[in-house]
Amino acid sequence: MSLAEKYPQEIEAIYAKYPADRKRSAVMPLLYLAQRDEGYITKGSMAEIAALLDLEVTEVASIVGFYTLYHDKKEGKYRMQVCNDLPCALRGADQFLESLCQNLGIQVGETTPDGLVTLEAVMCLAACDKAPMFQLQDDDKVAYYENMTVDKTMELIDALKKGGLGESIRDASSREVK
Amino acid sequence: MAQMVTLTVNEVKVTVPAGTLIVDAAKRAGIDIPVFCYHPKMEPVGMCRQCLVEIGRPMIDRTTSQPVPGEDGNPRIQFMPKLETACTNPVSEGMVVLTASEKAKAGQKEIIELLLTSHPLDCPVCDKGGECPLQNLTMAYGSSGSRFIYDEKQHAAKSIPLGELIYLDRERCIQCARCIRFQKDIAGEPVLDFYQRGRATDIVTYSEPGFDSIFSGNTTDICPVGALTTADFRFGARPWEMNHTASLCAQCPVGCNITFNVRREAKSGGGHSIKRIMPRQNEQVNEIWMCDKGRFAGYHFAESAERLTQPLIKGAPADLQTAQKLVAEKLKEAKAETVVLAGGRLANEDLFNLKQLADGLGGKALLYTPIGGGEYTAVYGLTAGSNLGDLGKGSTVLVIASDLHDEAPIWYLRIKAAAQRGATVVVANARATPLDDFATFVVRYAYGDEVQTVNSLSGKEQFAGAFSAENLVIFYGSDGLGMAGSTALAEACAGLVKSRAGKPNNGLVGVWNAANTQGAYELGFRPATDLASELKGKAVYVAAADPAGDDPALAEALKSASFLAVQELFLTETARLAAVVLPASAYTEREGTFTSAERRVQRFYPAVPPRPGTRPDFALTADIARYAGIELEGRSPLLVMNRIAASVKVFSGISYARLAEVTEQYPIVGRGDLYYGGTTYENTQGLGTHLALSQEDISAGAKPHAALRPKENELLAIPASKVYDRGTTMVAARLLDGRAGVPTVAVNPVTAGKIGLAAGDPAKVSLNEAEYDVIVKLDESLSTGVVLVYRSFGIPISEPTPVKISVAEKA
Amino acid sequence: MAHLLLRHRDIPDIKKLDVYVKNGGFTALKKAVTGMQPGQVMDEVKASGLRGRGGAGFPTGVKWSFIPKGVFPTYVVANADESEPGTFKDREIMEGNPYQFLEGVAIACYAIQSNVGYVYLRGEFYQLARELDDCLAEMEKAGYLGDNLFGSNYSLRIRTHLGAGAYICGEETALLESIEGKRGQPRIRPPFPALYGLYGKPTVINNVETLTNVPLIIEKGAAWYKSMGTEKSPGVKIFSLSGNVTRPGNYELPLGTTFRELIFTHGGGIPDGHQVKGIMPAGASSSIILVNSATFDKVMDTPMDYESVQNVGSLLGSASVILIDDTCSMDWIINKTMHFFKHESCGKCTPCRDGTYWMLHLVERIHAGNGTNADVQILQSVANQVNGKCLCALGDFSTMAITSAIERFPQDFESKVKT
Ligand SMILES: Cc1cc2nc3c(=O)[nH]c(=O)nc-3n(C[C@H](O)[C@H](O)[C@H](O)COP(=O)(O)O)c2cc1C
Ligand code: SF4
Ligand code: FES
């Protein structure tokens, strides 16, 4: 089934955000919709989005290629994106990531054998004061997990195996200011 | 008149129109600023940063708004602390630009060094080597060594086919986006784009077929490195080994100026081979572009091994003189019963001689064409001072019954550009065509309603203003029309431009299917209303036409001719029926002139020696005439043109010398500075000239025309043209086989559904009692009563004709 | 002092509409729409001296006044791309005190008479975007957005637009391209967005924090606002403190607060008895401030405002203060920043695209201990070669840490290279 058939209301709501003669603006939200639908962006959905917005498929593909949160390949059900950019690294993110790799038995960029988690290292996520941290991306959500330890993370992965993505954990301790 | 601005570039004072970019202003002063991403035909983007220069502007006193004088009394110049891009900054009064100061030179050198860190430096095996902007600019502006460790170079795939016509070498790409911008902004076919970002950025196409654009070859001209190359020329030759000859493209009536690149090869027995076609600048015709049909199909037919090289009498080899004498004898006998039938790909000189021969015998000179109405374009066509490039605000262009994109691709580009400059563009057709996307108004009518549509246009309120604009150019074609229909349409359109006759940028243009149809009309050729009956029983002399191959009915007619002589490049169906066959030289092997549908006469020059055994058409005809006792010029086309000028009024004043004249054109391209305009050739051999208008008294205005329309429960086959077909000059271009595809018909999805056909299904169409295998294409814009049948795909279609279509068993 | 921007720290439920309203929410918007001319709103903001919190510190009211009169439509775009390493203030504002920010967007829209505002969020703020969408729906329900606001003939809608992972989209023209559905690559300027912005129309782009200040200025007046901070940098600022510090986090303080106060009074100093070695006050885009026994007091007593930070060889930028202690070697630091910039270079212009690639190779080689003195010199020279030649500021940013590290911490490189 096409996106237009499956999500008519969502698509209308997306169009309504932009001036009627600026349909092209809808390309990014529509790509999110497609990604939500299939877990990644297929050539078929690029073609459909192109047709909806009067674009060439190549133009749509070019957007997918530019932005790092769009994926054109199927990977793990969850993408665990650990920030190891400078501020987090100053607070031990590199060591955290390394021991996570050891615990999961995979390298950065790889997916656990059960296809559950793809582990990635990413740039700053605007959570520098709560390192180590990562964001977990599934088809429908991006959730932050902050002030993490390897143990807490492994518990989370166990929970993921059993069920969905819990509420994101936000450690408020570091927010207390005198 | 634009306001003029004076500035100083490296001590040279230049005065240019306000708004001119520094890089172009410098160019006019003879100063080259190195560029990669900038191209004078496109909006600046300032990406490559190669054009860094120092820019100073007069200091302005805030209180008086006057320039502050310096010690020498001249305005004091304040230089910006940073280098700036010459390609994005427009000139301003009193500006001082330093393009070669120590600081500017250092900046330019530094950018080249950075660019080279990602370049493979594989010049010895690169097709662009020898005409490469990067290579040239590195020599001129770069440094001699590199501080970059070569092993750390990023490697990427080489030779990626972007479809079967164009190859991409990802390592060589410098991400200037010229190709992407050309496709988006100039061609309007954005099928190339960047993928990824940063250093990983590369060019991709996702279209089916890859790089699905009929202008793709132009990207290889403007690519400043060897990243994009054509499959036609890849590894073909090195630029410096080739000679170049000015010529014209003979594929359509636009008359694009081109250059043939030629070298001697063992493959042709040490003879000359054409290696590629490049565009040649003519800002009034094709600017610096050409379409892929011209580029990739323009010469292969002439190089074909199938070419005729031996005169034949009743199929048996004969010597030329005997064959020509036989023709002369037969025509002389037939006298007024002689019919000369000529195709529109012949040069003016050939046509003139053929016409003189027919006239001398008292016979008829008929033009073989599917499109009528040239008698109107001769009287109401374009004339001196016209240039589609001038159309913009205040101009209206009407395109009716034509798919300019497929039938005359460069006009599609130029009319699209006119629309973008503010011209009112009205596209009227019974089906959707690519130009619709850029049109101000799209008018949809039913096939058969063409004349009424023209009639109603000028009346309708929304258009009224458009048709009383300062300039009005009308392109009419033959989409869905045969001879009678197109002629009636021409007459109707002529009514709209009648009062403007002779005014520059006003007039009627026929979208012919051949390069010199306009010339044939101007020289007095006329199509027959009923060609078959004109041929029966006559002594027929056919040149450059294959009526028997196009239509079985015409083959029958020719069989009952009293005599048939054929002058041709190939042993066509018509030639097979002929008593005498005379091998003609291809236009690449001789000189001559064509008259474009815009009525511009232009010269082409010999690129290669004639194929042994062949002679140019005008000379073959002159000999026959002489043997028949009629004195014609057969020595050289130049001399024939002198006769044309002396005897055909609209040609008066035209000579080869005049046609070879060149005036300065902007942008300046093709000299030592390939990085600026690309590898397009500079025009040094003639811009051509417009014909005067014929003063013939001819009626104009819409007259009732009884068109055939689909009846209930009946389908009507409608003729239409596609850019790539299987015509005589196309089949030899094997590279385009895939794009031309198999015989195809288009129908409305509803029609297809009723018959049980889906897109891509095989089907059978029966037409005039014969059956043909086709593939079905769906087109929602078609009315349900018609089946669109493309010309020159082996299905004879010259007029709207009743047709049946049925499901074919899948093979 | 109670927080002005991070009000949720004092009033935890202020992210609920009724709580926000109960605490004076939307009075400023109502005051503007019903009692002030757009020009007066603009003048008030101009008079407050508010400067952009997105990094460049450009006076906000002046920016608004560049919008040509009589051109329609115009747009306001809130820059919520927040991707500078070390910056995490906008996120906290939007999570904790979203209505004050949205009220600021609304007032900005009114000031330039725009009927649509966009909030551009980085893609990672996916969840946050949904929360803001809910807030916007609440506002519309309660009559703070929609047609005929407060009975006037002014209508306004605000929409969110989500990016998808690209630091460059924080650059204002790249951001506009992204909303237009294109690759987020910067445009050449001029023309500036005030004349040719979103969809080619006049557009104001402001940072989230900048806009969150606006309701206070309208409500309490420019004079009140100017009483905080310094003469040239009035008002409060959120400092994102991160790196080697005991209590990292956001601190809302008057502009002009010293490094000492931020780092030691609020941040609790450097943990484990280590010393400060360098400070990056503007995230990864900073020149690294040299801190040693000779410079310590001078640096610590420097007020953090747009002018003073230049005296210690850096810029305030977005005030994302990253602390580096004496366990870190600068070759490691620049290895991190170069990875970031190479990853985020949009690829549009040559010096940044090829320069970040080259610099990263040099930095990696040096960091791995395989570099020579010549490599360090080449690195310095390539950085200078890139700086000042790029299409946008990202390319320049990428060189800041490198040039300052090599210049100010030569010993870290001398000890690293092969001799
Ligand atoms: C590479 C780059 C990244 C930027 N990222 C951001 C950002 O994430 N958030 C932001 O508000 N401004 C960012 N800016 C600054 C914006 O371009 C712009 O100046 C700012 O949003 C204007 O708002 P202000 O006047 O309120 O500061 C960035 C600039 C550059 C060159
Ligand atoms: S400086 Fe970098 S980010 Fe900015 S335009 Fe150039 S390549 Fe893109
Ligand atoms: S930046 Fe001026 S030519 Fe590329």
Image: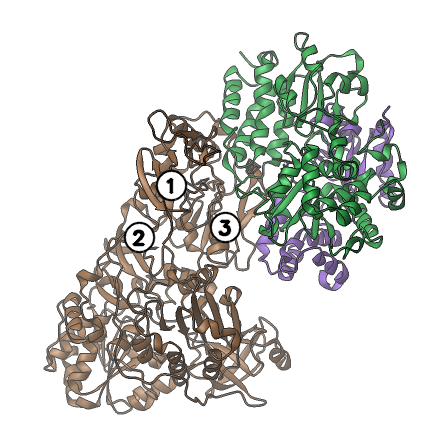
Chain colours: A purple, B brown, C green
The residue most toward the top is: C294
Answer left or right for B432 relative to A167.
Answer: left
Q: Earlier in the sequence, mark 2 or mark 1?
A: 1
Ligand 3 occupies quarter: top left
Tell me the amino acid under the disc marked 2. Gln
Dot 2 falls on a residue whose secondary structure is loop
- For the residue labelled by badge 1, is the local secondary structure a helix, a strand or a loop? helix
Q: Which mark is residue B27?
A: none
Query: Residue C405 falls in which quadrant of the image?
Result: top right
Query: Which mark identifies residue B180?
Result: 3
Image: B533 above or below B87: below
Pick the residue in front: C104 or B624: C104
- Where residue C320 appears, as percent x and y from the top left, is 71, 27
The residue positioned 68% from the left and 19% from the top of the image is C279
What amino acid type should be assigned to the residue bearing mark 1? Pro
Mark 1 highlights which residue? Answer: B133
Please tell me how crowded label 3 is: few (under 14), some (14-19), or many (20+) other residues with Cα within 10 Å: many
The residue that mark 2 highlights is B665
